[in-house]
């Protein structure tokens, strides 16, 4: 655990996850502990199969751990029931996945509005206004009425970023958010995430196996074989750039 004197936004304590099929137990997470603080921009590094995606699914309250605890905003989410988890997730956590998971028959605007309207957190007019503002912020103000099928891969991922921000979450979990993009689009999406983090102090935890992507983050947590192998803070160069 960190010695940082600030109050963590997210605190993970000895988290485990084991899948059991018949007589065979397959441990995926083997006692994960770490903290993430408000406003941080953190990379979670590790090879495929290391347990990163499983961990993010648990932290996003989409999957329950086998043992251990994780706390966010003072709530022990390992003891909450499903209704409590759904409400907490809708209000406090945003997601950006490798595959954008946009609704293909919806426009960009409708895709971004969807989380707020479906959860009943905003009236439609308010949601439409906020969605349009977010899409403009991510550079798609001229694509509001384009259906998802008419957007490029990089544009779809920008819509996904705007959608993740729709409910003003305290934490955004990004699982390989550039893994399905070409290098130029990946660079643009990471620049966008960094700018949003700096502007709004929204906390990001970004799972990746790409060292170049991880170098853009303030801190790196490496997961190998279901365990925390290392944590490393980035240094700040003379021009204010995050460096390895």
Image (tube, rainbow, N blue to C red):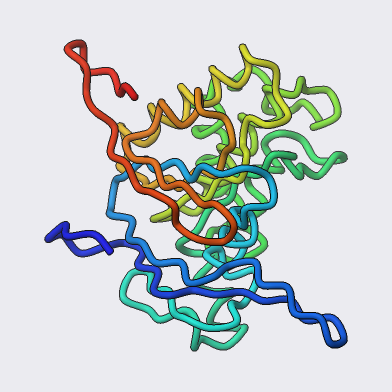
Viewer-closest of 119 and 4: 4
Q: What is the count of numbered marks?
A: 0
Image point (50%, 61%), residue name? 227
Image point (55%, 52%), residue name? 224
Quadrant containing the C terminus is: top left
Residue that sits furthest to the left in the current view: 5
Relative placement, left or right, of 197 versus 225 is: left
Is 157 above or below relative to 168?
Answer: above
Viewer-closest of 14 and 117: 14
Is 159 above or below relative to 242?
Answer: below
Across and down, in percent, residue 13 comes to 39, 74
Is 240 above or below relative to 170?
Answer: above
Relative placement, left or right, of 38 versus 181 is: left
Image point (61%, 36%), residue name? 177
Viewer-closest of 239 and 243: 243
Across and down, in percent, residue 236 comes to 22, 24
Across and down, in percent, residue 142 comes to 64, 17
Image quarter of residue 226: bottom right
Image quarter of residue 69: bottom left
Across and down, in percent, residue 38 comes to 28, 53
Quadrant containing the N terminus is: bottom left
Image point (30%, 32%), residue name? 198
Relative placement, left or right, of 5 versus 154 is: left
């Amino acid at each position: 655990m960190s010695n940082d004197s600030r109050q963590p936004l997210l605190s993970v304590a000895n988290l485990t996850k084991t899948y059991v099929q018949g007589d065979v137990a397959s441990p995926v997470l083997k006692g994960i502990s770490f903290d993430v603080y408000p406003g941080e921009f953190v990379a979670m590094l590790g090879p495929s199969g290391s347990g990163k995606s499983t961990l993010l699914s648990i932290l996003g309250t989409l999957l329950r751990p086998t043992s251990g605890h994780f706390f966010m905003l003072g709530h022990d989410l390992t003891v909450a029931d499903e209704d409590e988890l759904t409400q907490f997730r809708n209000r406090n956590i945003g997601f950006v996945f490798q595959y954008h998971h946009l609704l293909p028959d919806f426009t960009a605007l409708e895709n971004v509005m969807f989380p707020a309207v479906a959860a009943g957190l905003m009236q439609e007019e308010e949601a439409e206004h906020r969605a349009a503002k977010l899409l403009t912020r991510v550079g798609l103000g001229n694509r509001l009425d384009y259906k998802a099928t008419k957007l490029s891969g990089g544009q779809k991922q920008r819509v996904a970023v705007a959608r993740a921000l729709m409910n003003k979450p305290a934490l955004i979990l990004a699982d390989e958010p550039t893994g399905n993009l070409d290098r130029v689009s990946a660079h643009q999406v990471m620049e966008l995430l960094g700018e949003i983090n700096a502007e709004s102090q929204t906390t990001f935890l970004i799972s990746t196996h790409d060292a170049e992507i991880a170098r853009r983050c303030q801190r790196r947590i490496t997961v190998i074989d279901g365990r925390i192998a290392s944590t490393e803070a980035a240094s700040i160069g003379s021009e204010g750039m995050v460096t390895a």
